[in-house]
Image (cartoon, rainbow, N blue to C red):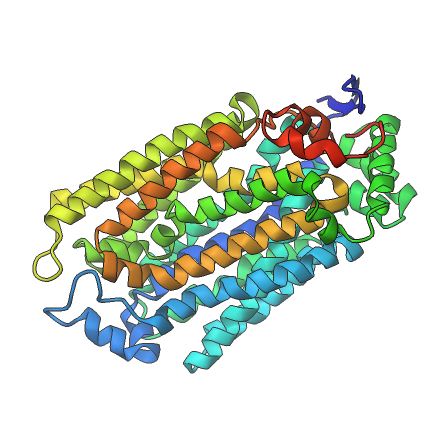
């Protein structure tokens, strides 16, 4: 499959190359970083709904949960319970900036290996936890692992993929996140019956994808861009031949050399990010992460078992409903892999805004009318309808804001600010994941059904932002974004006046 080299003047030149089996293997191994992240997202909500776990660490929540007249919306409202879930993301926020430096200085591959080691330590501490301090400390180590993995994996995937397949290969990261969520829901469904240590099994299995990434990353290559950036020029050429499956890679190799030379001229990439010329990429990357969280998706995926218990399902039925939404999540992400490099990024985001808005509003109306603060839950038919609406919402998110929230930031920064810029994206995602994770159960208690209208309002803002300010990047080579995208956009081109990049060939 041909890749494209683009000159600064806009002239396109094709060169030979194909997607190789080795690249596919590299993609699958790297994407285990997504599986780690997804498993943790899914496992947290299931574990925090298990009675054995609540009795040991959160006895006050256990009492509220089983109190006959407790407020339906407030039975799980506990700051320490929320801290168990959300402290991971605060740690990941801090780790993402350290990971940015590691990516640039030591490469994407080693950064992924460090991520897996942090995660394994965190698994040992949480699964073997004997007090609240120990499991929260373990969650912090898990957060370090997530921060390093989320920084390195999307960059790795974008840099080894041919431009015409970059979207599909990069979305494998999000696909593995959804698979991790599904697997965690299945495991929770069975371990809830294992007393009194089912929760330990659920938390302990998180070490499996981390171990796979740790061992598998020994087999994969470093990206040619990272090797050349770190002065390993001939090794970079050798790896480029290997991943493209051809001997003559001179055009693409020269373009990476030029991109690295431009990157060397920037001594402080974080300062470069603050200049107007970097404003479009930085604003879009940060906004996409904020919007991704304010769809309400992580609130639903973190606390799906809790949410379904709130509307009337028992423990087992709630976990089974979470498995169903997990399946929808996986298959919808597969749809995104097929469509993203055909239909483009914008159309997926805009369609999903409509789908998610309708689902959120109808859920809010049903809960507002039918679910009272005390007393009976929803009828069986109404509760099933809520599950269907949640699946519709998850479906829209999974083929749009989920994968594209990671894909777009990984492809729009020039090489000189790529690692630093993506660090801002990762840290923003972790910050707002922390905020939502820490606040959701309290928001559910205070806002009740209104929380779904709150998220629906954000979907309107997201749609407007996409329509007016997000350009299409489908098929545009990573290092051609300035000339092919930003200088052509009605609004962002005004920020490009300081761009003094020379007229060079870029991948």
Residue shown at 84% from the left, 27% from the top: 503
Residue shown at 51% from the left, 39% from the top: 403
Residue 235 spot, x, y in % from top left: 88, 44
Residue shown at 64% from the left, 53% from the top: 423
Residue 208 vs 262, above or below: the answer is: below
> Can residue 331 be seen in the rendering of this structure?
no
Name the quarter where the N terminus is drawn. Answer: top right
Name the quarter where the C terminus is drawn. Answer: top right
> Can residue 242 be seen in the rendering of this structure?
yes
Residue 304 spot, x, y in % from top left: 31, 53
State the residue lying farthest toward the right. Answer: 234
**Left/right of residue 25 with respect to residue 236 in the rendered view:** left
Q: Nearer the viewer, residue 37 or 280?
A: 280
Q: Nearer the viewer, residue 29 or 112?
A: 112
Residue 151 spot, x, y in % from top left: 63, 52
Residue shown at 64% from the left, 32% from the top: 166
Residue 438 spot, x, y in % from top left: 39, 64
Residue 84 vs 176, above or below: the answer is: below
Residue 306 vs 505, above or below: the answer is: below
């Amino acid at each position: 499959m041909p890749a494209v080299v683009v000159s600064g003047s806009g002239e396109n030149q094709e060169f030979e190359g194909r997607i190789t089996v080795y690249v596919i293997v590299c993609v699958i191994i790297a994407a285990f970083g997504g599986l780690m992240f997804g498993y943790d997202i899914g496992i947290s909500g299931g574990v925090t709904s298990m009675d054995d776990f609540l009795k040991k660490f959160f006895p006050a929540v256990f009492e509220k949960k089983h109190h006959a007249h407790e407020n339906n919306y407030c039975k799980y409202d506990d700051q320490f319970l929320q801290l168990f879930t959300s402290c991971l993301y605060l740690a990941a926020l801090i780790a993402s900036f350290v990971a940015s430096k590691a990516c640039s200085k030591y490469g994407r591959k080693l950064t992924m290996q460090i991520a897996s080691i942090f995660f394994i330590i965190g698994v040992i501490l949480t699964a073997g936890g004997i007090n609240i301090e120990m499991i929260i400390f373990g969650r912090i180590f898990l957060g370090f692992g997530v921060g390093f993995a989320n920084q390195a994996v999307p960059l790795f995937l974008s840099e080894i993929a041919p431009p015409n397949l970059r979207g599909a290969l990069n979305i494998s990261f999000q696909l593995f996140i959804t698979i991790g969520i599904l697997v965690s829901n299945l495991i929770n469904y069975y371990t809830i019956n294992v007393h009194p240590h089912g929760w330990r099994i659920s938390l302990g299995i998180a070490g499996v994808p981390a171990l796979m990434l740790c061992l598998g990353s020994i087999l994969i290559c470093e990206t040619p861009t990272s090797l050349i950036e770190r002065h390993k020029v001939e090794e970079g050429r050798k790896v480029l031949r290997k991943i493209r499956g051809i001997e003559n890679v001179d055009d693409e190799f020269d373009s990476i050399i030029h991109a690295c030379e431009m990157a060397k001229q920037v001594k402080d990439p974080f300062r470069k990010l603050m200049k107007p010329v970097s404003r479009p990429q930085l604003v879009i990357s940060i906004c996409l992460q904020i919007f991704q969280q304010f769809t309400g998706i992580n609130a639903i995926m973190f606390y799906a078992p809790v949410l379904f218990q709130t509307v009337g399902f028992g423990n087992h039925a709630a976990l089974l409903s979470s498995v169903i939404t997990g399946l929808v999540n996986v298959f919808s992400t597969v749809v995104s892999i097929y469509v993203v490099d055909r239909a483009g990024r914008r159309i997926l985001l805009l369609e999903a805004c409509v789908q998610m808005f309708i689902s959120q509003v109808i859920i809010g109306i049903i809960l507002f009318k039918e679910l009272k603060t005390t007393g009976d839950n929803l009828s069986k038919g109404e509760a099933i309808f809520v599950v269907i609406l949640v699946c519709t919402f998850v479906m829209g998110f999974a083929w749009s804001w989920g994968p594209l929230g990671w894909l777009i930031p990984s492809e729009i920064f020039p090489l000189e600010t790529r690692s630093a810029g993506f660090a801002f994206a990762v840290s923003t995602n972790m910050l707002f994941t922390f905020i939502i994770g820490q606040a959701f159960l309290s928001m559910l208690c205070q806002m009740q059904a209104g929380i779904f209208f709150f998220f629906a309002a954000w979907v309107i803002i997201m749609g407007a932002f996409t329509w007016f300010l997000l350009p299409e990047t489908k098929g545009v080579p990573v290092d051609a974004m300035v000339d092919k995208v930003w200088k052509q956009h009605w609004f962002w081109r005004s920020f490009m006046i300081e761009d003094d990049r020379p007229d060079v060939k870029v991948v």
